[in-house]
Image (cartoon, grey):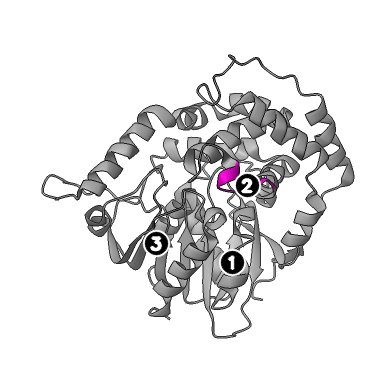
Amino acid sequence: MAGDDIRPFRVEVPEAVLDDLRDRLGRTRWPDQIPGSGWDYGTDLAYLQDLCDHWASKFDWRVQEERFNRWPHFLTDIDGQQIHFIHARSDDPNALPLIITHGWPGSVAEFLDVIEPLRETFHVVAPSLPGYGWSGPTTEPGWDVQRTAVAWKTLMARLGYERYGAQGGDWGAMVSARLAAIDPEHMVGLHSNMLLAFPADASGIELTEQETADLTSAGEFMTRGAAYQEIQGKNPQTLGYGLTDSPAGLAGWIVEKFRAWTDNGGSPDDAVTRDQLLTNLTVYWVTKTINSSIRLYCESQRTDRFGPTGEYVTVPTAAAVFPKEMFRIPRAYAESRFNLVRYTRFDRGGHFAALEEPDLLVQDVQEFFRDLR
């Protein structure tokens, strides 16, 4: 592996940290809830109490730790920030490198079910975003989408990869898009399951009935479902005290998003397993990174790099559109900003594609890059 400052790492959480987590869960001071209100006011009390009981008494972190440590982990320092990444090389030495990037409120735990099938055809690089998971808290301002993309360019060069692909959703989609914009000489393709693109003038674009409904849905999300963006984008430190101190508070904040953003029948459990949900929550808890993770919203708003890249991206691009994704961009919108060569709409799945529909996501990624090798 290239680079003298890349050091091996293992996921090993001290038992005292897990004991403290269970103790805090057992001493949770629960709020009231209007009888029969369910999820109308936010995360349902009965659901969260049951989930936290499961977290404290049934969830086995050590099993998940073994799943993480099946793959080689590494740490490196880029632009003054520790960066953690999984590097799962393919058995095929000529495989194409692929950097896959998660978002919020996700983590590299999202990719535990897709690394092995992707490794059949790719050297998989799965970093934790700066301020997330084992990349540790950020320690200075300015870690926005653009700076992260520059760090990913450095990381891939440090690993010795001269040609590579990128895949991402949520923040990972935005980071990957900006990576394509700044490193087209080395990136052979961009695959996104939340491609964001808005034409300078949309007045002449004819939309299908489905695309019109998609834009209406996105507008409703921004009106009714994006309050978290305002809080995390403007006052992250204030929110961080409660989420860092209370695992139940952390769970309540994140679970709401898993229910709202997944393709489910009314409960997050319909879309992801409890082990998947609690593994992701535990990553935030044991690394003490919920506060630094939400700072990404603030940093990107302050530098006006919250949304998609403004320039036209020449790298061949694929958009995977899942029906319960918050932002489902019309094909013509995507074509206005990206060299779009593949646009796939699926009949199931939501925001957390790698968790909800790993087989669909992997197949789409493999088919897209097959012609770009």
* In-image side of 312 versus 54 (left or right): left
CA gap, disc 2 and disc 3: 23 Å
At x 43%, y 68%, the residue is 364
Query: Is the residue marked by circle 2 packed among few (<14), some (14-19), or many (20+) residues within 10 Å?
Result: many
Task: Say which residue label 1 marks.
Answer: 125
Query: Is the residue marked by circle 1 packed among few (<14), some (14-19), or many (20+) residues within 10 Å?
Result: many
Q: Quadrant of the N terminus?
A: bottom right
Secondary element type, mark 2: loop
Judge depth for marks 1 and 3 and give the one in front: 1
Q: Are marks 2 and 1 in contact (CB under 8 Å)?
A: no
**In the image, what residue type sits under mark 2?**
Tyr
Q: Is residue 10 visible?
A: no
* In-image side of 7 versus 336 (left or right): right
Estimate the x, y position of residue 233 in percent, counting from the top left.
Answer: 48, 32
Query: Is the residue marked by circle 3 packed among few (<14), some (14-19), or many (20+) residues within 10 Å?
Result: some
CA gap, disc 1 and disc 3: 19 Å
**In the image, what residue type sits under mark 1?**
Val
Pick the front one: 346 or 116:
346
At x 48%, y 46%, the residue is 263
Question: What is the span of residues highlighted in magenta in the rendered image?
Answer: 269-274
At x 53%, y 48%, the residue is 103
Query: Which numbered disc, 2 or 3, marks the residue that appears first in the sequence?
Result: 2
The quarter of the picture where residue 373 lies is: bottom left
Task: Say which residue label 2 marks.
Answer: 132
Estimate the x, y position of residue 304 in percent, counting from the top left.
Answer: 38, 39
Residue 60 is a magenta residue = no
Q: Is residue 1 visible?
A: yes
Residue 272 is a magenta residue = yes
Estimate the x, y position of residue 371 in percent, counting from the top left.
Answer: 38, 80
Q: Are marks 2 and 3 in contact (CB under 8 Å)?
A: no
